Image (cartoon, rainbow, N blue to C red):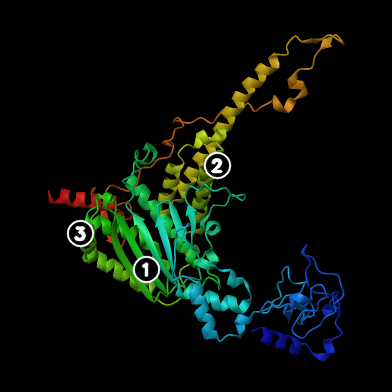
Amino acid sequence: MASSSVALSTSSRPDSHDDCDLHHSPHEGYCYSLTNARKICKLRAKIETPDYLPACNLHAWLKQKSGHCQAVEDCGQLCNRLGSHNPPYHLCFKHDEGSNTLPCHILRLPTELRLMIFRYLFPEYVSHLAHAPQPKVAILKVNRQLYQEASAVLYQESRFEALVAYDSVRLQGKQWFRSPCNKKDDRDFSIDSMLSPISARRIKNLEVQVKIGEHYHRAPASIDSRGVTKEDYHLYATRDSVRKLVGLLVGQADTALEKQNALKRLKLTAAVHQAASWEPEETVFAIFVVLERFSALRGIENAELMVEAIGQSWATTADKSAEFTDKLLNKKTFIQLRNRWVKTVQKPGPSVPMAKWKDPALATAYRKIEEFAQLMHNREAQGERPWPMGAFYDIRRPLHLARVAYERDDMDALKSIREAITIRWVNAQRHQQQSLQLMADSIDRMWDGDVDEDDEATSMKPSVLYRDAFEFGTEEPIAQTRKTSALWEELDATDWAPKIGSPGINVMTKGVLVRIEQKARNLQWIRLRTPAIIRQIWAAQKALEA
């Protein structure tokens, strides 16, 4: 390798380039050895032997082999100065401390060998875990050719794992949290800023596990009372997390870049917690309500949908899990919905971008409310609990109501949530202003009757000297019919759709949607076919049979 490097360097420079000043060595004619102090020897070279560095009489015994520096100078030609024999580059004193112009000898290899090297560098699976070893992608930064070849191996052959839960999305060792705790200067906690959308949209093989039915956990009254249940809270939140992951894969707009459908193999695993205690029919529709947004994908050549049972080790055995899985996989409803989903995602063409999922105004209104909720969670996680946070205690309830309103295309409900947050902010500010004014007046009264003995005049009061610190607003808080609480009682969580089974009400089901019609008034309401809705339909059917 050394001899070939030297031969290449001496033959790569044309004769007309010999006079270039960039290749002249100021150390020419001197000893190339290092002193005991690790500095270049300043004595004249007395001994010059082919293939060895010139040396003075003092360092002649070292007999250091030489090479020609392979770094590229600004003129575009190889440096070619003498350097220590250190293949493959033999760097000279100028480039020994580092150079970004070294030739890449890996490009001399046949393409097949380079691809074998890349397959050795990159793992077969790219885990979603943050502490798991992640692929080393420094080689992608070498040059354009290596980026194209290596990235093709990484994103097309490696299998990427993702984990979706009601409160998080994990991909490529990175995490998006609904309640972010990490500190960010820009305070942007959207999934696009926490995960990498550019690399996500290049993934060809993706395996996603979605956790469903985690509502067995204890929950505060704010999300388990007054029209809100833990079951619906977790289902809508998990569905929202899935929507965010799919949005990361397909992009926001219908642009040429985002039309490129890289994803070709998709394996979904619905991990249903045994503590959910659902009937098989409820479990099937809970799964497809959560996973429905994956239907926005297109051009998937190999699509799989699996089910597994998860839970505490003492409560879930292998036999119980297998029985649970077989019961679902063989259920007619599950087979029909799965076949319909597979047929949809295998359609050719670009995926459906996020801009076409919902009215952009609706999506923007929901996103703004979510951004505010994330900011509140993050400030609290950072130990920064400013006084107004008490006014927004347990922001999870209005955020859940916003998710429900988004799914129901209810812009009025989103506006009501936005208005409730605004009124709480205004009232918190005005209450604080009144409290500060009381304290400022008390401090100011300390100076009443105080006389300066030097000029026998009344001293200037603090309210005069520091007017900005002693004058506050006098506006009264906005009147509300209900007292501010963590239950956010000013927001009505009642579903205004007629009760299923009521006289004059017709119910039609299609996939994961339920249409409730009141023909007498020519009205209809669209709802997700959640386990709660299924139980209402069953109750109405039993009432009719009775």
Which label lies toward us, 1 or 3? 3
Q: Position of residue 221 (x, y in %)?
A: 37, 37
- Left or right of 537 in this view: 40: right
Lower position in the chain sequence, tag 3 or tag 2: 3
Task: Tell me the distance, in whole angstroms, between the alpha carbons under discs 3 and 2.
Answer: 45 Å
- The local crowd at label 3, few if under 14, some if 14 to 19, many if 20 or more residues have their Cα within 10 Å, is few
Residue at (73% x, 85% y) in the render: 9
| Residue with the mark numbered 2 | 382
Q: Secondary structure at mark 3?
A: helix
Q: Position of residue 499 (x, y in %)?
A: 28, 47
Q: Is residue 177 above or below residue 358?
A: above
Name the amino acid, label 2: Gln
| Residue with the mark numbered 1 | 267
For the residue pair 184 and 239, the one nearer the viewer reads as 184
Image quadrant holding the N terminus, namely bottom right
Lower position in the chain sequence, tag 1 or tag 3: 1
Q: Is residue 530 visible?
A: yes
- The local crowd at label 2, few if under 14, some if 14 to 19, many if 20 or more residues have their Cα within 10 Å, is few
Name the amino acid, label 3: Asp
Lower position in the chain sequence, tag 2 or tag 1: 1
Q: Position of residue 347 (x, y in %)?
A: 39, 76
